[in-house]
Image (cartoon, rainbow, N blue to C red):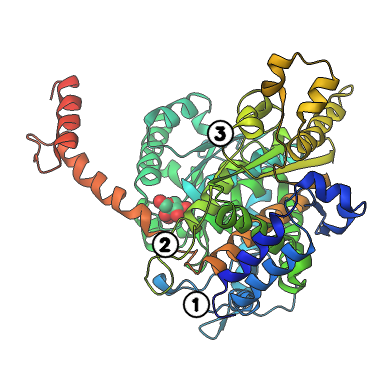
Amino acid sequence: MSDKWEYLDEAMTASSRNTIKELFAQDPDRAKKFSLSAAGWFLDYSKNRIDRKTMNALVKLAEASDLRTEIEKMFTGEKINVTENRAVLHTALRNCDPDAKVLVDGKDVMPDVRAVLEQMGVFAEKVRKGVWRGHTGKKIRYVVNIGIGGSDLGPVMANIALTPYSKRSLKFFFVSNVDSTHLAETLRSVKAAETLFIVASKTFTTQETMSNAEAAKAWLVDKLGSKDAVAKHFVAVSTAAKEVAEFGIDTANMFGFWDWVGGRYSLPSAIGLSLMIAIGPANYRKFLRGYWKMDCHFRTAPFGKNMPVVLALLGILYSNGYGAESYCVLPYDQYLSRFPAYLQQMDMESNGKSVDKDGKPVECVTGPIEWGEPGTNGQHSFYQLIHQGTHLIPCDFIGCCQTHNPISDLHDKLMANLFAQTEALAFGKTEEECRAEGVPESLVPFKTFEGNKPTNTLLCDKLTPETLGALIALYEHKVFVQGVIFNVYSYDQWGVQLGKVLAKGVLKDLTAEKPSGRHDASTNQLIARYRKALGR
Ligand code: F6P
């Protein structure tokens, strides 16, 4: 078959033959047949519009996209980020094989990876044990990570997720927004003499991060009365040593990473420093081990039994086969409350592309609109639309069998809701069932649920550093697989540039003696109104 998308047509033909309810009625072993285990996670994908033929055709789509070769290219450091001429090696950051060698331009990157991990560990322990002191000799009690995008979302998400492993005497804050309120409210909650600022920025040029970092530095110097205080209260995580030094941070207190780590894939690099301080180096290494276990599974498992590949193929079935526009991730765990936001950047900044690798318009629908909220909160908000609205929205439900906080039967109730939602979405409720329940005829149309709504359920025994690492790697690889099949470059993000450049020109016009007036009529009007409100 020359056109690989014909495999999707083949998958669709098989998929549209039966409803999920019919598929379950036909095969009592269906749940077992469409389930997988990897790296501490169990995936039940039986509540999808699939049978064996559908999955076989989807696997052929992956094979016809040369997925196996592409996976090897990534793991072995080939420069698959072509538009930036970079390798894509976040997998090297968590490679736990002590003998592993990963070459970029002929140089093994693993010694540097291990050295930075070691440096982070030493520093994290100093802060945790109170050995690292502030300018006035006080112990650190507050850690403020200043970063945005990949230098913020991962650290925030993981910090919340691993709260049970966190040193509770230390308080963590994350400042990202260039809205001064974010910094101001944070500074109100900390004491300068006991605060460590981590300036996290791959490039060390990002407007938001550098503006917040400069403002935090000025605040600290003002509070502690000396510029010398900066050395004890600011460290940097970056690839840009020169810029770090120019900012005034001693490069001895810089934790490096490399251009082959994409921002949205950088959590297991030094960008995870705040997390390591929170959970300690030993737990951090378990976190990396979790990633690595999923990496090994992804690299070796046959596609039909490969968790990231299966999730990716199902996603493509719905987006490109059924025309689903969005995709919902629903963690039934409060500790994963920021996981959907984290995934948004990972997926949408990677595969939100409309040009293929040859620079031509893509032939398919690329990355989905991704969203979600923790359960059960979402049930009382947007689930109505998923159950009875006109959009098809495939969902991933994520749950942990054991809670860190057993209180009466709350956890049983939480999990009962998770399982019940997937049941309701798949099987719905027919008109006959409504009538049998005594629903008045006039209400039958409103109380009928169509069902046949696809869901995946991911379960782990407990949310731990290891299972969290594996979960993140699962989605990273899912995004990779989709990018390969869409034939787009997943590791650049040119689409965020234009707004950044224009903002510089607009900023000048907000503050200049006289605005240039060189924007469109709407933008000129907004600038004028803003200036008037401020008396400029
Ligand atoms: O604006 C997009 C982006 O480049 C992301 O890809 C990145 O995670 C974020 O900005 C922050 O970049 P940096 O770590 O260089 O400050």
Q: Which mark is residue 79?
A: 1
Residue marked by disc 3:
194
Can you tell which quarter of the image residue 230 is in? top left
Residue 8 spot, x, y in % from top left? 61, 65
Residue 160 spot, x, y in % from top left? 66, 38
Nearest to N terminus: mark 3 or mark 1:
1
Q: Does label 3 point to a residue whose CB lies under 8 Å from ligand 1?
A: no
Q: Is residue 175 visible?
A: yes
**Left or right of 177: which side holds 414?**
right
Quarter containing the N terminus: bottom right
Q: Nearer the viewer, residue 90 or 115?
A: 90
Residue 397 spot, x, y in % from top left? 73, 42
- The mark closer to the camera, 3 or 1, is 1
For the residues labelled 2 and 1, the Cα–Cα distance comes to 20 Å
Q: Residue at x 46, y 39 (%)?
A: 176
Residue marked by disc 2:
240
Quarter containing the C terminus: top left
For the residues labelled 2 and 3, the Cα–Cα distance comes to 27 Å
Q: Residue at x 74, y 43 (%)?
A: 398
The secondary element bearing badge 1 is classed as: loop
